[in-house]
């Protein structure tokens, strides 16, 4: 019996412990001609219920009491519920907004009150026919015409504010307003928020309509989406319209008279109504200058707290510091606060978590900094500062968390003296921080802008000189070979020598006074010379043939007569040997003179054409040499003229002065000096590199990336420029994936970039000279194997020469091409077409590299490394 009493007491206590409530349900907006329902619901048995609506509303019917009970048993546990409802039908008596009193009563013997509630009464609505969406407002009479008026169904994007500063959060609600009977939706296009960071904060699973008063009209309103927007750029930002198609049930229009049965057998049809929101412009102002160093993007009102996971720990033990930034504003956009950890602390990647309310504008963001102290001691961290822009105050505010003191004791792997014991794990050297490499202070090697050796006349003249030398040497070698194989020609060339030899013999006979022998030898000398020189055989050697041959070769008649006289005298003297010494001497002198004149005239006629070719070759070679000397010695020629020498001295002095100003930290003055050097028309990869470093030190990220890219265009293998460019890229907001190239394309590009354009040009000349030598060997070597090897090697070297020439030309073309650019504005919208009013496809930030593929007026078509394309104003970029 005691157990039964105990159980009944527990049940009674449990029943009494259930919360007793009394709630009210009523529309928020009604019209003057509308009868509406008010319901009070109690979670239990009600006694002494009492409610009066007041004088502003008339009770048409009620109260009507109803009740319901239910019992459920789950896992052997019995639960029961009992509710009672009191229903009234009311009619408003006047227009306005009224506060109705709450109902009172005892619910399960506990006094309860529903609380007051507000109902707004608007003027009577126009004639209405059917129930609207959501079961509240009725559909207008326009439905009888099988159409839906724009004022009966529309879509609206409601913004909490339209004039903000960059980073200030905005709440946007997409709301559907209807006075029709909506049966469904299709082709829904939600708004795009280009220029904003956006996040959906409310996405209903079911669409619920509530009554709202819009300009004195009652509408059923449903929130389709709610967003939190944070503007990321300055200026006027236009939000593109949202769009959807609503399926609306309407009654077909009747062409004839209606009967009394139409209301019983009424039929409806579904029509489609396309609705969209108007474009909305948000005016965004930039944040003022002078942001503190601890500013991390916060806009709103915030406070900061910090705590360590443990205050005391051992060396090499893991711990963490949690920093929480809480308040209202752009919580999701808050960046990581900077904490200066001791150098001996090994710090790992920061983890962040968010706790944000439904609207997305209030809450907190927690940053966790894991670390491991590698040495023992007492360390103080902080204070940790965080700056934000206070919208209400219109200024930057800095808040801070107090200092954190950490006591690190020696760990198991250290001894009391602080020295690591043997067997400790060795670690690689860690970077404490990262910074760009220093400027170059050596010879800048300035040269004319866009001037490359492969595109100069000197390069082609040197190639021509190699070709000319090849053909000259080949011609000489061929001539020597031909001469060796030509017996007649050999006799012709040796005719003079042989004649002089016979003349010497004749002279000796003359001195011995042997007239017969003398004239015999003199006759042989003259005839032999003429036979060899004129290519006349001994059988055909006659005075007539000799005279005709000499005339064909342009020999004068006088000289021909002298030759014939010599031959006649020799023949006569052979048969009349009594000749005096004076006469023999005279004949000898005449013969020597005639042969000398013939030799001179015949050789001049024969060698005229080869001499002309040699002269032309000599002139061309002289011209090439002179041009090369002019181009090579241009700096020396400039030094000879006082005016140009001053310019050269100024460039050197300007370079030294700019480097000195940079080292002193006077970056603005150093930049002016570097830019003055560039404007002089003399540039180099080193000058571009130093200019980029100066821009980086001045905080101009876009310009620094631009000049690093220009340095790499001038010298693709510039390692310092590559390193500094990668550091600068780490500050660019846009992270764009690069489409990978085919491995062979990458290999060829890396090979081409390993040497400058001028370097490839000189390699081409060296290979061309080697090719010429190998082909000369092919022509001149006597052995078949040697000739074959030299030919094969020469062809291979010629192929390499063509490749190096292509590398040189393409490298030069790449350096002077204008097919890439850097975004210079902090934020730039990429449009779908060259029109400021076209859709924005995506947003780019300063420092991002784009490829230029087309242009139209003041617009240029760009492509990202991931393949996306769009149009940008030319003023937003600067060509590399």
Image (tube, rainbow, N blue to C red):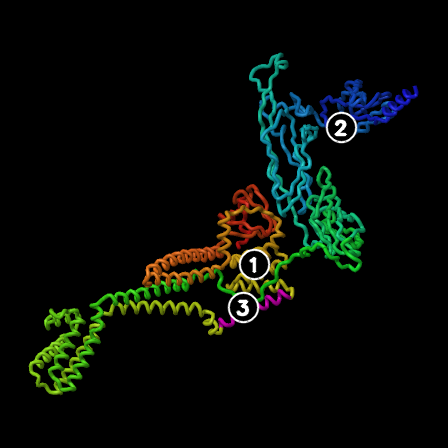
In the image, which disc is placed on residue 651? 3
Q: Nearer the viewer, residue 693 or 410?
A: 410
Decide if residue 741 is on the left or right side of residue 236: left
In this view, 181 is above or below 588: above
Based on the displayed image, in which of its 4 quarters is residue 664 positioned? bottom right
Q: Nearer the viewer, residue 180 or 367?
A: 367
Q: Residue at x 86, y 27 (%)?
A: 17
Quote the CA–CA distance across marks 1 and 3.
25 Å
The magenta span reads 643-663
Within 10 angstroms of label 2, few (less than 14), some, or many (20 or more) residues? some
Q: Residue at x 18, y 81 (%)?
A: 505
Quote the CA–CA distance across marks 3 and 2.
84 Å
Determine the secondary structure under disc 2.
Answer: strand
| Location of mark 1 (residue) | 719
| Location of mark 2 (residue) | 119
Earlier in the chain: of badge 1 and badge 3, it is 3
In this view, 798 is above or below 615: above
Residue 394 visible in the displayed image: no
Choose mark 3 or mark 2, whichever is in front.
3
- Residue that protrudes farthest toward the top in the picture: 260
Earlier in the chain: of badge 1 and badge 2, it is 2
In the image, which disc is placed on residue 448? none
- Residue that protrudes farthest toward the left in the picture: 576
Within 10 angstroms of label 1, few (less than 14), some, or many (20 or more) residues? few
Determine the secondary structure under disc 1.
Answer: helix
Find out whether residue 73 is within the magenta segment. no
Q: Nearer the viewer, residue 241 or 585?
A: 585
Across and down, in percent, residue 397 comes to 74, 51
Find out whether residue 644 is within the magenta segment. yes
Quote the CA–CA distance across marks 1 and 2.
75 Å
């Amino acid at each position: 019996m005691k157990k039964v009493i105990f159980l009944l007491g527990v049940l009674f206590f449990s029943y009494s412990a259930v919360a007793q409530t009394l709630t009210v349900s009523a529309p928020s907006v009604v019209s003057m001609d509308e009868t509406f329902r008010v319901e009070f619901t109690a979670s239990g048995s009600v006694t002494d219920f009492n409610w009066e609506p007041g004088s502003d509303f008339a009770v048409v019917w009620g109260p009507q009491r109803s009740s319901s009970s239910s019992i459920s048993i789950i896992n052997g546990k019995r639960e029961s519920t009992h509710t009672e409802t009191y229903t009234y039908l009311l009619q408003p008596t006047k227009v306005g907004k009224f506060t109705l009193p709450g109902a009172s009563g005892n619910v399960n013997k506990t006094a309860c009150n529903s609380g007051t509630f507000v109902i707004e009464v608007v003027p009577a609505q126009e004639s209405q026919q059917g129930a609207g969406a959501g079961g509240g407002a009725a559909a207008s009479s326009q439905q009888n015409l099988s159409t839906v008026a724009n004022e009966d169904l529309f879509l609206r994007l409601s913004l909490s504010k339209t004039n903000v500063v960059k980073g200030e959060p905005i709440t946007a609600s997409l709301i559907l307003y209807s006075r029709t009977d909506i049966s469904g939706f299709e082709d829904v296009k939600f708004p795009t928020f280009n220029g904003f960071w956006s996040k959906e904060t409310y996405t209903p699973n079911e669409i619920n309509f509530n009554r709202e008063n819009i300009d004195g009209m009652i509408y059923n309103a449903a929130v389709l989406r709610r967003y939190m927007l944070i503007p990321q750029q300055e200026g006027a930002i236009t939000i593109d319209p949202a769009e959807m198609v609503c399926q609306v049930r309407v009654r077909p229009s009747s062409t004839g008279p209606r009967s009394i049965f139409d209301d019983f057998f009424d039929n409806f049809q579904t029509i489609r109504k396309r609705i969209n929101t108007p474009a909305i412009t948000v005016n965004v102002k930039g944040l003022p200058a002078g942001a503190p160093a601890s500013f991390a993007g916060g806009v709103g009102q915030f406070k900061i707290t910090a705590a360590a996971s443990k205050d005391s720990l051992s060396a090499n033990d893991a711990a963490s510091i949690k920093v929480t930034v809480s308040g209202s504003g752009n919580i999701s956009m808050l960046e990581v606060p900077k904490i200066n950890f001791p150098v001996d602390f090994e710090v790992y990647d920061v983890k962040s978590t968010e706790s944000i309310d439904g609207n997305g504008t209030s809450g907190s963001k927690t940053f966790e900094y894991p670390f491991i102290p590698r040495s023992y001691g007492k360390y103080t961290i902080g204070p940790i500062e965080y700056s934000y822009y206070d919208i209400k105050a219109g200024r930057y505010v800095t808040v801070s968390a107090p200092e954190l003191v950490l006591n690190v004791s020696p760990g198991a792997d250290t001894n009391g003296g602080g020295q690591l014991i043997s067997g400790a794990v060795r670690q690689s050297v860690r970077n404490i921080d990262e910074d760009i490499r220093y400027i170059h202070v050596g010879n800048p090697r300035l040269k004319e802008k866009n001037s490359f050796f492969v595109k100069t006349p000197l390069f082609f003249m040197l190639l021509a000189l190699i070709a000319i030398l090849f053909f000259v040497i080949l011609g000489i070698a061929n001539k020597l070979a031909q001469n060796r194989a030509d017996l007649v020609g050999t006799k012709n060339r040796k005719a003079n020598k042989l004649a002089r030899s016979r003349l010497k013999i004749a002279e000796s006979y003359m001195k011995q006074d042997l007239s017969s022998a003398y004239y015999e030898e003199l006759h042989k000398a003259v005839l032999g010379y003429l036979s060899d020189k004129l290519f006349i055989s001994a059988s055909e050697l006659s005075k007539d043939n000799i005279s005709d041959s000499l005339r064909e070769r342009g020999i004068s008649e006088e000289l021909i007569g002298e030759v014939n006289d010599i031959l006649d005298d020799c023949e006569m003297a052979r048969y009349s040997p009594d000749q005096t010494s004076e006469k023999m001497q005279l004949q000898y002198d005449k013969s020597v003179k005639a042969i000398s004149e013939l030799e001179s005239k015949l050789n001049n006629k024969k060698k005229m054409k080869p001499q002309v070719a040699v002269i032309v070759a000599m002139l061309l070679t002289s011209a090439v040499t002179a041009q090369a000397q002019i181009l090579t010695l241009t700096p020396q020629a400039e030094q000879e003229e006082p005016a140009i020498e001053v310019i050269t001295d100024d460039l050197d002095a300007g370079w030294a002065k700019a480097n000195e100003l940079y080292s002193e930290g006077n970056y603005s003055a150093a930049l002016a000096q570097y830019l003055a050097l560039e404007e002089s028309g003399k540039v180099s990869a080193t000058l571009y590199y130093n200019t980029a470093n100066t821009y980086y030190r001045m905080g101009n990220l876009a310009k620094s990336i631009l000049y690093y890219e220009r340095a790499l265009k001038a010298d693709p293998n510039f390692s310092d420029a590559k390193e500094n460019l990668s550091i600068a890229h780490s500050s660019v907001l846009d992270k764009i994936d690069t489409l990978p190239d085919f491995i062979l394309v990458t290999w060829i590009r890396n090979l081409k970039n390993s040497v400058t354009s001028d370097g490839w040009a000189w390699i081409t000349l060296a290979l061309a000279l080697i090719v010429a030598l190998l082909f000369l060997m092919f022509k001149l070597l006597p052995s078949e194997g040697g000739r074959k090897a030299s030919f094969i090697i020469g062809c291979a070297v010629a192929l390499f020469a063509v490749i190096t020439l292509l590398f040189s030309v393409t490298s030069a073309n790449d350096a002077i091409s204008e097919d890439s650019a850097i975004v210079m504005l902090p934020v730039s919208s990429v449009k779908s077409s060259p029109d400021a009013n076209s859709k924005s496809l995506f947003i780019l930030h300063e420092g991002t590299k784009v490829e230029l593929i087309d242009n139209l007026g003041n617009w240029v078509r760009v492509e990202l490394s991931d393949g996306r394309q769009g149009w940008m104003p030319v003023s937003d970029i600067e060509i590399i």
